[in-house]
Amino acid sequence: MKTALPLLLAGLVLGGCVTKPDRETFYTPCKAIETRDWSAHLEVSKEGIFPFPTEVALVVSGTVTVPTGGYELAIDKGPLVALEPPVQQVLLRTTAPDGMATQAITEERVRGSMPFDKRAKSVAIRCGDATIARIPVIEDRRTPSAQ
């Protein structure tokens, strides 16, 4: 047994122990029936150090149709895609309520704010493993002095 442990550790080190992110955690299943009216703009983050907000926030909003009321909708920052020009991915999360029974199709507004990567020139909104919307130009709503 004394020789088995060093051999096992050497195999892990030399072979490289690689773990992949859980696809279900990153790209969660999409329960949206349809989405529309997506917009993205920049504003000075309210999360900055008081009284001097320093970060620029990317604010994304849209309308999502889900199978029934009670869905938790959220927008999360996704990875920056190294295209030319770079594209900021935004992830729409649709979480069904506990004990859900389909009752009536419901439309919900969703809005999310996240730190902005200055390299991004457009936004791609993803739900599940599909791109559901593209916003080619990010509107800058900061005051001229904040830019």
Image (cartoon, grey):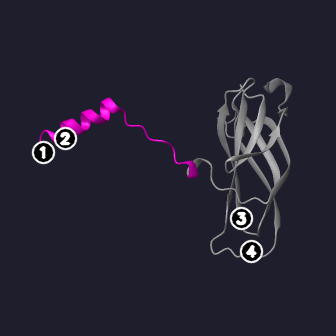
Which element is circle 1 on? loop
Q: CA distance from mark 4 to mark 1?
A: 57 Å
Please tell me which of labels 3 and 2 falls first in the chain: 2
Specify few, some or many for label 4: CA neighbours under 10 Å numbering under 14, 14-19, or 20 or more: few
Q: CA distance from mark 3 to mark 4?
A: 11 Å
Residue under numbered circle 2: 5
Residue under numbered circle 1: 1
Residue under numbered circle 4: 102
Q: Quadrant of residue 43?
A: top right
Q: Quadrant of residue 70?
A: bottom right
Q: Residue at x 71, y 47 (%)?
A: 130
Residue under numbered circle 3: 71
Report if the CB atoms under discs 3 and 4 are less than 8 Å apart.
no
Please tell me which of labels 2 and 4 falls first in the chain: 2
Report if the CB atoms under discs 1 and 2 are less than 8 Å apart.
yes
Q: Between residues 144 and 113, which one lies in front from this camera angle?
A: 113
Q: CA distance from mark 3 to mark 1?
A: 53 Å
Q: Between residues 35 and 60, which one lies in front from this camera angle?
A: 35
